[in-house]
Each structure stands twice: as C-alpha cells, then as structure tokens.
C-alpha cells in the first residue's frame, strides 16, 4: 500500500495550453492569471455571441436574411455561451466553498 495518498496526483506541466493563453517560458505569470484569463475569455465569448444573435435577429426581422436557420443557430450559440459561463462560475464558487471548509 502506498504511504503517500497524493502521489498519484500529477501537476499539469503545460497549464497555458489549457487556457489557450501564451505564458512566459520561465513561468513567472504562474497559474493565477490563467484562471482570470479563462473567465475573461468566457465573458468575451458571451458578448460576441450575443452581438451575433442580435444582429441575426435584426436581419431576420428586416427581411435581409436569406436563411432563417442562421438566427436560430446564433441564438443557440449565445445560450450555450451563457450556460458555459454560469457553469464556470458555479464550479469556481463550489471550489471556493470547499477551500473555506478546510481546517488547517
């Protein structure tokens, strides 16, 4: 039996690849900025998809859109982006709650 219970947990070697951000080679930025970058990216995605949805709805309402399915696709993308952001927030709050319950 292994005496070290956490020996199977391995750190992520290239954490910048997960967030899609470029980090310095020396790792001076650490993972603190990656967490904020992920949320910023999710928020930007919500803004972009909402803008695309509004534009598609305007084009559909004014009769300038040839394919009405594009408006539905844009609305679905916007809803998925919002749901992703909400889930990220919920998971972050759950993780924070768990950290505050740890007795040192």
Image (cartoon, rainbow, N blue to C red):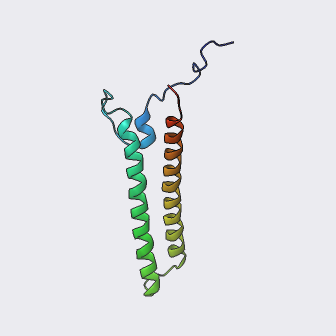
Vertically, is 98 above or below 87?
Answer: above
**Which quarter of the rendered picture does the N terminus lie within?**
top right
Residue depicted at x 37% and y 37%: 32
- Examine the image and state in which quarter residue 14 appears: top left
Q: Nearer the viewer, residue 100 or 58?
A: 100
- Examine the image and state in which quarter residue 17 appears: top left
Residue that sits furthest to the bottom in the current view: 63
Residue that sits furthest to the front in the current view: 103
In percent of width and height, residue 76 lies at 54, 67
Residue depicted at x 53% and y 59%: 83
Vertically, is 67 above or below 8?
Answer: below
Q: Nearer the viewer, residue 95 or 75?
A: 95
Vertically, is 32 above or below 2?
Answer: below
In percent of width and height, residue 61 lies at 46, 85
Residue depicted at x 37% and y 42%: 21
In percent of width and height, residue 15 lies at 43, 34
In percent of width and height, residue 8 lies at 59, 22
Residue depicted at x 38% and y 57%: 44
Q: Nearer the viewer, residue 60 or 28?
A: 28
- How many dots with numbers? 0
Vertically, is 65 above or below 88?
Answer: below
């Amino acid at each position: 039996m292994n005496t070290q219970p956490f020996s199977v947990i391995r750190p992520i070697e290239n954490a910048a690849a997960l967030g899609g951000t470029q980090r310095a080679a020396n790792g001076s930025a650490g993972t603190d900025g990656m967490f904020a970058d992920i949320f910023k990216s999710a928020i930007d995605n919500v803004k972009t998809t909402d803008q695309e949805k509004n534009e598609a709805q305007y084009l559909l309402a004014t009769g300038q859109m040839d394919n009405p399915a594009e408006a539905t696709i844009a609305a679905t993308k916007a809803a998925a982006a919002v749901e992703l952001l909400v889930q990220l927030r919920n998971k972050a709050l759950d993780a924070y709650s768990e950290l505050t319950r740890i007795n040192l």
